[in-house]
Image (tube, grey):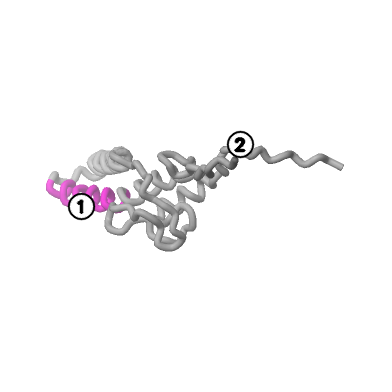
Amino acid sequence: MDAMPIQNHLDTTPPLRPRWLSLKRGFRQTCPSCGRGRLFGHFLQVNDACPSCGEELHHQRADDAPAYFTVLITGHVIVLGVLWTEQAFMPPLWLQAALWLPALLLMSLWLLPRIKGALIAYQWAVQMHGFGGIKEEPPRF
């Protein structure tokens, strides 16, 4: 008979959380924990807690990272599109502007909350910034 490992009562290793599932949930702008509750109350304002499961979300520290990633992605896509369109069709400048400026605006507005959601979900999954803090029990005497 194999001996079962003894659970160390001092073991404070938090349980692992599914990273890819959390990222998908965050990209869908839902709670990284349950996947049902809305992550944002308004366009980019994160709810303090999930309205569905109650998971605290106020720990998040997305800061400027979502904007940087959004600019990085949209910049590459739009510049590639502008250069390809110019090489292939040589349209007038006003047509390029009429095509790519709205595309830039729409792509940025669509991507920004999704990238912020995915970043917050990643922070939750790897238990950064207080997301995975195990509540310490008072010492027993």
Name the main secondary structure of what is drawn in magenta: helix
Give the image location of residue 133, x and y in percent.
48, 42
Q: For this view, does 51 lie left or right of residue 4?
A: left
| Mark nearer the N terminus (2 vs 1) | 2
Give the image location of residue 73, x and y in percent.
32, 41
Residue 60: give its label.
none
Q: How far is mark 2 from mark 1, CA to CA?
A: 56 Å
The crowding category of the residue bearing disc 1, from other C-alpha atoms within 10 Å (few below 14, some 14 to 19, many at least 20), is few
In this rendering, is residue 30 above or below 86? Answer: below
Give the image location of residue 57, x and y in percent.
39, 50
Q: Is residue 84 visible?
A: no
Q: Which residues are magenta?
A: 94-111
Q: Amino acid at mark 1?
A: Pro
Name the residue carrying label 1.
102
Q: Amino acid at mark 2?
A: Leu
- Indicate whether residue 101 is drawn in magenta: yes
Name the residue carrying label 2.
10
Residue farthest toward the front in the current orientation of the protein: 141
Q: For this view, does 69 lie left or right of residue 15?
A: left
Give the image location of residue 105, x and y in percent.
22, 50
Q: Quadrant of residue 36?
A: bottom left
Find numbered disc 1 in the image and state the secondary structure of the residue it sits on.
helix
Quadrant of the snapshot with the N terminus: top right
